[in-house]
Amino acid sequence: MSPEKQLELLKRGTVQVVTEEGLLAKLRQSHKEKRPLRVKLGIDPSGSELTLGHAVALLKLKQFQDLGHQAVLIIGDYTGMVGDPTGRKRTRPALTHEETLANAADFARQAARVIDIDACEVVYNGEWFSKMTFADVIKLAGKMTVARMLERDDFQQRYRAGEPISIHEFLYSLMQGYDSVMVRADVELGATEQLFNLLVGRDLQRDAGQEEQAVITFPILVGTDGVRKMGKSENNYICLVAPPEDMFGKVMSIPDSLMPHYYELLTEVPLSEIEGLKGDLARGGGDPMEAKKRLAALVVARFHSDDAAAAAREHFERVFSRRELPEEMPEFVVPAEIVKDGAVAPVDLLEKSGLVPSRSQARRLVSQGAVSLDGVRVADSESPLPVSDGAVLRVGKRRFATLRLPR
């Protein structure tokens, strides 16, 4: 594929390329010299499970692999001990090295759902950070000023609010940037919130006499709540290696408005079709349920198989189809005061609907797995869930209500 065609393909689902001209020049040089570019992606093992949020970056890395380039996956066993401060309102709890290694133990197997792990360079950044002396750390710290660090919005906000900022948090960007020097990255991938860290890599490479890496950023994948970044701490995530039926059901639980976002970042559906879906949703037309089933099937097929996707859809339709619900169900108009950004705390929904006599019983039933919303089991009684008009709330085997949103 020509460098121009490669660039066009790689730009899908991205927010920014720094710089587009620089990346095109690298692709042209790679094409001319028949030398693959070294494309870096770093993942910190702050938890033991990769999510579909991680998959967005891994899919972009896979695109580079398919184009013949060299994928370099850095597992941040040392950066993971510091914890990325990006977007954080307070210092992350510190992890021990043993904890980061334990979390990362299964990362390669999980990443293999997306990338060709056998053709990928998988390295731990402890390979170089563990060998640094304190003099080396001081030298690295001298590459950055406090003034530049405080240009970051997250640090500015914490400083103005009187929230503590630990010195080790300042080191994170330098550590991530130093990774680029050590693997001689031509390109680095990261979410848009990572831009500051990614640009530090360019600075350190230039200082080391290397050619600056190109930087590609992409949107943050919003979680199933439709509001916040997908993450385990928010209880709004979909595990990359979740069983097909579970993955299908969780994709079906996202708000309709989130479908174009997922289609663009997790599937290969043409952008023109996604624009058509956006128009249908804006006009209240089309068939949102069928569009979401298609999305869920495409996601399951991508991370499992076509057969698994077909079986997951059949299971969903058999177990949760409206044909198997009572022909008549009471309707419940959700009070506007308990709806925030299209989401409602399940405990409020259960109490106000009258399906349970008390909030304590609502919490107990949720903990027992007896509550579902549109066929998807409610896992937490307090975490807000997106609700749509016509959704079915079910408690146990015999209590149902069709939800109606306030006009």
Image: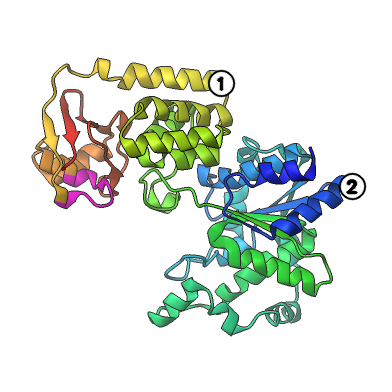
Against 333, residue 400 (above or below) is: above
- Circle 2 Cα neighbour tier, 10 Å, few/some/many (<14 / 14–19 / ≥20): few
Report the residue marked by disc 2.
32
Quick one: 299 or 287, which is closer to the camera?
287
Q: Residue at x 71, y 39 (%)?
A: 117
| Residue 294 visible in the shown view | yes
| Image coordinates for residue 56, horizontal then vertical, percent | 57, 44
The region drawn magenta spans 337-348
Q: Secondary structure at mark 1?
A: helix
| Image coordinates for residue 144, horizontal then vertical, percent | 66, 80
Residue 181 shows which numbered tag?
Answer: none
| Image coordinates for residue 366, horizontal then vertical, percent | 25, 39
Q: Residue at x 57, y 50 (%)?
A: 103
Name the N-terminal-most of marks 1 and 2: 2
> Which residue of the protein is positioned furthest toward the right in this rendering?
33
Q: Is residue 156 left or right of residue 113?
A: left
Report the residue marked by disc 1.
306
Instruction: Give, as a three-letter code, the residue at label 2.
Output: Lys
Q: Is residue 162 left or right of residue 368?
A: right
Q: Quadrant of the C terminus?
A: top left
Q: Residue at x 50, y 32 (%)?
A: 273
